[in-house]
Image (spheres, coloured by chain):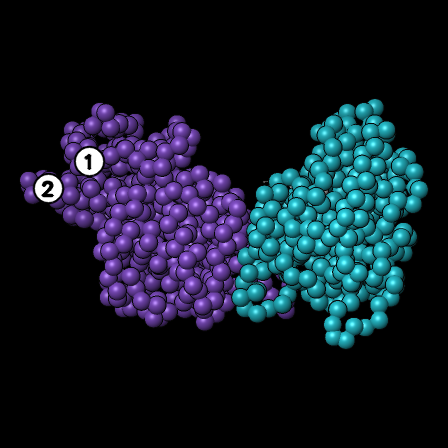
Amino acid sequence: MNVTGVEEEVHSHTEHALWRAGNGACAGCGMSLGLQWVDQALDGEKPTMVVPACCAVVTPGSYPTTAFGVPAVATTFASSPSVATGVSRVRQMNGEDIPTICWAGDGGTYDIGLATISGAAERNEDIIYICYDNEIYGNTGGQRSSATLPGARTSTTPAGKHEPKKDIMAVLVAHRIPYAATLSLAHRDDFLRKIRVARRLRGFRFMVMLSPCPAGWKSDPAEGIDLVRAAVGCGLFPLYEVFDGRRYRINARPDGTALEDYLSRQGRFRTPSFDHAATRAAIAEQWAYLDAMEAAFPAGPREGSDVPAAPPPPPIAPEANGPVTGP
Amino acid sequence: MSRAYVTGNHAAGHALAAAGEANRRARGCCGGAYPITPQTEIIEYLMAHAFARGSVVPVESEHSAMGVCIGAALAGARAFTASSANGLLYMMENVFAAGYYRLPVVMVVSNRTLGPPWNIWADQGDSLALRDAPWLQFYCDSHQDLVDTILVAFRIAEDLRVLLPAIVAQDGFLLSHTQMVVDLPEQELVDGYLPPLDLPHHLDFGRPRMYGGMTWPRDTQRQRADIQAAMDRVPEVLDEALDDFERSFGRRPVSAFSAEQTGDADIVVVACNTLAETAREVVRARRAAGERVGLVRVKLFRPFLRQALVDAVGPASRVAVLDRNHSPGSGGIFWNEIATSLRSRPDVVLQDYIVGLGGSDVAPAVIDGIIRDVGTRDTAADPIFITEAVA
Ligand SMILES: Cc1ncc(C[n+]2csc(CCOP(=O)(O)OP(=O)(O)O)c2C)c(N)n1
Ligand code: SF4
Ligand SMILES: [Mg+2]
C-alpha cells in the first residue's frame, strides 16, 4: 500500500533524509514509516535525533554505516531525555534553533526511562519527544512492557498479560507540558500537522505513536496501517492532543469499527486470558474520560493549527486545521 | 591570585565554574547537578554561579546528571558535574558511556562510603568502583591540590591525544568540609590556561553521524585499543599540562606520584588523599628518630603508571600499602595495582593494610603501628584489616 505518495518516497530516499533506505527494520515496521513522516513534516529542516537502546538503535545498521541521515546519538536505555537536555541547552545558549528529537520505544518511555522523561518534562526542556509504542520490547525479542495491553501474549507473559496498559498520555499531561498528542500512521494529515505544531511550540512536547510491529504483534507486515486504522476506529487508540496539559481536543472519534477487527488479525491476542468484555469496558471508560475533559477544557479554535498564527494569518484548509474524522 | 579560606567543596566549585566560564569564548559550559553528601555544596556553588554562557541543570538523578554532561559535551560545551558514593553507582552506566563516547567531562568526587548501611564518611570504594571505566582518576590531598588538579584535568581530558573524561577525587568531610587557605585562580589566568574546547566529533549537520550505534566485535576491539592508546599518552600530556600550569600559576601540582624520602628508605608507605597527609607526618617523625622510612603518595590512579610507581618506591625492601577501600574476596584496590607494578621486584615484601573503612579515623598511631608491623615481616601476609577498636 502506498501511504506516503510518490513525492515523499523520493524524498525519503535522498542521502540526507532523516531515515534512509537500507535500514534493517523488519518489513512493515511502524517505526520506519513514522521516522519518514517526521522528516516530511519538518519540511527539510534537519533535527538532532537522540535515541535510547531500542529497535531504532539497532536497525540503522552497524558502524561505519547508519540509516540516519542526520546526527543521531544512541544513548543508554533510560537516558534519551537527559542527553537531549544537554544537547538542547547548549544549542539554546548558542542561539541555535535546531530541533532536538528523542525517538524512543515504549520500554524506554513507559518503563526504564519514566523518571528521566518526567524530569525533562517537569523542567520543560526544549525537546520534542516521540515514543513509537509497539507495546512490547521488540529489540530484545518481545517481552512485556507497561504499554502492553492486558491479555496480550509476550515472551514474559506467555499466558497473556494481567495488568492494564499504563496511560502514558495522562502521565505526561499531568506535567502540564506545552503539547501532548497521540499519532496514528493511518491519519497522515493529522500526523504531519501534529509534528509541525510541536515544532512551532517551545518546551517539552510529547507524542506517542502506535507502532505496528509484525514481529511482536504476530501480524501480517502488509497490514500495519490497517491495524492502526482499526485501533483508532474501534476506540482503543484515541487520537487527541492536549495543550499546556489543560486543554483537550479529540481528533478522531470511534467510527464503529469492531474491536474484533483489530484483535483477530494479531496472534498476540490469541490467549485464553484475553477478556473482550473488560477491554470494551476499558475503551468506553477511556472515552467517557476524554469526552468529559474535552467538554470541560476545550482547546482554543486556533490551537493546533499547523500554520503560523501571525502575521498575516494565511487561509487554513479545514482538513488541516479541524479535527480529523477518520480516514 | 585571590587567597581565600574555603572548604574543599567551595574550592572545587570555584575551579569547575572557572573552567566552564573559560569556554564562554567557544560553546560555553553545561552540566547536570544532583545533591548527595558530601559533595552537595559543589553543585550548589555551580547552580548559584552566573555563567556568561553556561547552563547547569538541576536534574532528577545522577544518571541524568551524567546524561546531561554527555549531551552537552556532544553539542560542543565544556561539561562537568560532581557526585559521591551511591550517586556514582546510580550514575555508573552513563559514566562508562561518557568515556566510550570519548567526551572530556570532568567530575569531582567527594569520596564517601557506599551503603547501605548508610554512612556519609570518607571511603574511596565509590570512585574506585569505577576503576574499569574509561576515565582518568586523580586523588587530591589538599584544597590547593584539588583546585589545581581540576584545571589540569580539563587540560588533559580535552587534549586531542587523550580525549577521555576525568574524575578528581577528595576525601569527603576530611577535605570537602574542612577549610584551608587556598589560592583561587582568577578567571583571566584560567582563560589563559584552558583553550576553548573544539571537540573534533561534536554534533555536526554537515557530517551527520551516529554516535554510539551498533558495532561488530572487530570495531569494538579497535575502540578499546584506541582508549588504551589514549591512556598511554597521558604521561606526556600530563607533563606538558603541569609545565604550562607552572608557567601560568607559579606552582606545580604533584604529577602521578610523589616520592618523599624514598631514595634511601628501607620501608615505604604508599597512601593517597588525606591518608598520605597523615602518613607524611608519621614518616617525618620516624626520620627524625633516625629510621629510613619514606612515603609514596598516589595522585594519579588511572592510568596507573606502573614504572613510575616502581621508580617512586625506590630501593626499599618493604612496602606497606594503606587502602581506604576494600574489594571483597580480594583486598585493597591500590594494593592490587601496586602488586602488579612491583612484579619486577620480587624481593619486596608488599603488605596491604585496609584502614579507615567507612570513614573510621586513621590516627598517626595507626600508621606508626603499620610501619612497625611491616618492618618485622620477611614475607607478606594476606591483606590485613585494621579496625578502629584494634588500633
Ligand atoms: C539498562 C539496560 N537494560 C536493558 C537493556 C536491554 N534492552 C535493550 S532494548 C530493550 C527493550 C526496548 O524496548 P522498547 O523501548 O519498547 O523498544 P523496541 O525494542 O520495542 O523498539 C532492552 C530491554 C539495555 N540496553 N539497557
Ligand atoms: S521488532 Fe518490531 S519495532 Fe523492531 S524493527 Fe521489527 S517490526 Fe520494527
Ligand atoms: Mg517497544
The nearer-to-camera label among 1 and 2 is 1
Residue located at (62% from left, 42% from top): A114
Please tell me the numbered disc located at residue B363: 1
Chain identity of mark 1: B
Q: How far is the residue under mark 1 from the one under mark 2?
A: 14 Å
Residue located at (75% from left, 50% from top): A297
**Amino acid residing under circle 1:** Ala
Neighbours of disc 2 within 10 Å: few (<14), some (14-19), many (20+): some
Chain identity of mark 2: B
Q: Mark 2 near ligand 1 (CB under 8 Å)?
A: no
Q: Are marks 1 and 2 on the same chain?
A: yes
User: Is residue B200 shown left or right of residue B20?
Assistant: right
Residue located at (86% from left, 29% from top): A276
User: Is residue B370 shown left or right of residue A169?
Assistant: left
Q: Is residue B158 above or below residue B391?
A: below
N-terminal of the pair, mark 1 or mark 2, is 2
SS at mark 2 in the image: helix
**Amino acid residing under circle 2:** Ala
Chain in cyan, by letter, is A
**Front residue of B16 and A6:** B16
User: Is residue A275 shown left or right of residue B289?
Assistant: right
Where residue B184 appears, as percent x and y from the top left, is: 29, 61
Where residue B68 appears, as percent x and y from the top left, is: 53, 53
Chain in purple, by letter, is B
Residue located at (81% from left, 45% from top): A291
The residue carrying mark 2 is B285
The residue lying furthest to the left in this view is B289
Say if residue A163 shows up in the picture.
yes
